[in-house]
């Protein structure tokens, strides 16, 4: 019994006591842990406390840094390129559609979306921006504010006639600063987001300008028909998070340290460049003039003394008229006798500047979600292998940002546009609007495709794609997605040009010529390759 008590810690004085040096948070001799204060709160409380200051700092440093502005542009280019390409994947198998009818329906969806999304008067409630531009702004908001907010609205027929437009569904991208910071447990509102009894967002409270006054207005997350009306996208850290926070927050300290480092280095180098000049001058002393006076009173001595005096006076007069000017228009005139001007070499930046600067910039690039080379535009020392690994590491980050932030903005607008097209009869659908409502989620399912994955060697990447297709580990639509192309569009364009070449009596470039040369070794089957080696 005593042994069991000792094992399970049930004993009295004989029970083992934990060592004060064991377990977590064991400090070192420098007591470094004790100097770092920390408190534990809900992450959403940390976001609420720091949100406004973080957003203000992020906006300030981006607006005043060409490098950070370029980094944000790089984030947009990597994530969406020119635009996110719509790839509808509706499930129409239970609605009487065969394969050809489904393909025709998908083709109509893509054409209607393209025409609507690229017309700012049709897609934007304010009539200012096309849909791809609003996605760009949403990504900027995600970097600065940590979230993006878009409302969907429907313009009535009378107002549409006034503006001469045809569609009623409208996107209204709103700055996250409009979402109030109101928090009240009795109203079940936290940072402007109103929740129902089980924690689902039911409405969003926005502060808007109306007749010169600020008015708070609630916008429902879903309408009476169950359609989503608000897209509030952010990257949560905790399951209780309600709002996002700027992606630059973890890197504020590194950026400001880097900025101070660069400013101090530049100022010191300018001072050294301007003032690191030494003028050496042999001035006349009193002993020199006394020696001249001591030459004597003879005629020859007086003549020599007068010549020396005139020479020295002329030299001093000439030296007094000379000048040294260092500035935007540098000028150095004749120096006096015995004067020498030396330009000293600068000692700044020192050997530690580049390592420290690189380390600080690497932290910034990691927080933003781009490579260090893209952030600094410095590819010194890069190799094919390192570039490949860099791309392989960052591509999932880009894809995740595309799927979590950019795609939901497009998807919400796409759903409302298709809903309107089928509801008004402009897009024919079997079973009508009732069948569409009954299968809305299956019909509106779509994928959004971004730009091609960056490659360090196009030839090697193309060869790898061919190998995957031959090995059966990939498909054409997957490979098209890798290069930023739509498999359906590629098929349609290839069929069009193939038939056109054949109709004109020309050889089609899409038909491989079996007699064009010996088959490459990497495409020869294993058994034939072995026979060739045996021969």
Image: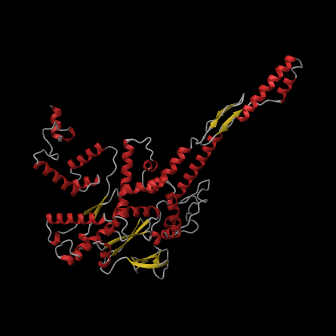
**Is residue 63 rendered to the left or right of residue 75?**
right
Is residue 475 visible from the viewing direction of this image?
no
**Coordinates of residue 276 in the picture (x, y in percent):** 65, 38
The figure's colour scheme reads secondary structure
Which residue is pictured at 29% across the width and 75% down the height?
A: 161
**Coordinates of residue 499 in the picture (x, y in percent):** 13, 51
Q: Which image quadrant is residue 416 in? A: bottom left
Q: In this rendering, is residue 268 above or below 182?
A: above
Which residue is pictured at 33% across the width and 72% down the height?
A: 170
**Coordinates of residue 263 in the picture (x, y in percent):** 58, 50
Q: How many marks?
A: 0
**Is residue 375 rendered to the left or right of residue 326?**
left
Quarter of the figure that contains the C terminus: top left
- Relative to the observer, which residue lies in front, 441 or 296? 296
Is residue 12 visible from the viewing direction of this image?
yes
Which residue is pictured at 42% across the width and 49% down the height?
A: 374
Q: Residue furthest bottom?
A: 186
**Is residue 311 rendered to the left or right of residue 422?**
right
Q: In this rendering, is residue 44 above or below 318?
A: below
- Relative to the observer, which residue lies in front, 218 or 365? 218
**Coordinates of residue 185 in the picture (x, y in percent):** 48, 80
- Relative to the observer, which residue lies in front, 55 or 367? 55
């Amino acid at each position: 019994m005593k042994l069991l008590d000792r094992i399970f810690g049930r004993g009295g004085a004989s029970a083992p006591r934990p060592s004060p040096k064991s377990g977590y948070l064991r400090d070192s001799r420098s007591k470094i842990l004790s100097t770092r204060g920390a408190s534990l709160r809900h992450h959403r409380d940390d976001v609420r406390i720091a949100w406004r200051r973080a957003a203000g700092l992020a906006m300030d440093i981006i607006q005043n840094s060409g490098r950070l502005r370029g980094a944000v542009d790089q984030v947009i280019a990597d994530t969406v390129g020119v635009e996110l390409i719509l790839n509808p994947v509706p499930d129409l198998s239970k609605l009487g559609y065969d394969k050809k009818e489904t393909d025709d329906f998908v083709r109509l969806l893509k054409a209607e979306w393209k025409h609507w999304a690229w017309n700012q008067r049709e897609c934007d409630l304010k009539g200012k921006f096309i849909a791809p531009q609003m996605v760009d702004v949403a990504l900027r908001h995600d970097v600065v504010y940590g979230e993006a907010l878009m409302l969907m609205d429907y313009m009535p027929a009378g107002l549409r006639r006034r503006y001469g437009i045809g569609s009623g569904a409208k996107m209204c991208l709103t700055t996250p600063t409009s979402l109030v910071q109101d928090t009240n447990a009795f109203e079940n509102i936290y940072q402007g987001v109103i929740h129902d009894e089980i924690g689902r967002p039911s409405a969003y409270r926005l502060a808007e300008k109306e007749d010169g006054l600020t008015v708070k207005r609630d916008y429902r997350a879903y309408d009476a028909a169950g359609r989503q009306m608000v897209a509030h996208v952010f990257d949560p850290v905790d399951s209780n998070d309600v709002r996002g926070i700027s992606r630059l927050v973890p890197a504020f300290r590194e950026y400001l340290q880097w900025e101070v480092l660069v400013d101090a280095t530049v100022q010191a180098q300018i001072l050294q460049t301007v003032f690191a000049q030494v003028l050496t001058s042999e001035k006349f002393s009193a002993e020199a003039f006394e020696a001249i006076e001591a030459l004597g009173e003879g005629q020859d001595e007086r003549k020599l003394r007068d010549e020396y005096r005139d020479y020295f006076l002329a030299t001093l007069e000439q030296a007094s008229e000379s000048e040294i000017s260092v500035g935007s228009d540098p000028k150095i005139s004749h120096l006096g006798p015995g004067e020498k001007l030396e330009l000293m070499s600068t000692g700044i930046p020192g050997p530690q500047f580049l390592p420290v600067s690189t380390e600080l910039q690497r932290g910034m690039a990691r927080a933003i979600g781009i490579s260090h080379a893209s952030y600094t535009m410095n590819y010194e020392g890069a190799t094919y292998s390192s570039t490949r690994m860099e791309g392989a590491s960052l591509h999932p980050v880009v894809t995740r940002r595309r799927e979590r932030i950019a795609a939901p903005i497009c998807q919400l607008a796409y759903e409302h546009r298709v809903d309107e097209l089928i509801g008004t009869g402009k897009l024919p659908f079997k079973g009508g609007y009732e069948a569409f409502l009954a299968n809305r989620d299956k019909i509106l399912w779509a994928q959004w495709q971004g730009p091609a994955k960056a490659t360090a060697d196009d030839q090697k990447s193309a060869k790898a794609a061919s190998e995957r297709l031959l090995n059966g580990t990939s498909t054409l639509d997957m490979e098209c997605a890798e290069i930023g192309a739509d498999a359906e569009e590629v098929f349609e364009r290839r069929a069009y040009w193939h038939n056109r070449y054949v109709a004109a009596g020309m050889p089609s470039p899409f038909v491989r010529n079996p007699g064009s040369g010996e088959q490459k070794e990497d495409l020869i089957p294993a058994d034939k390759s072995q026979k060739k080696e045996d021969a």
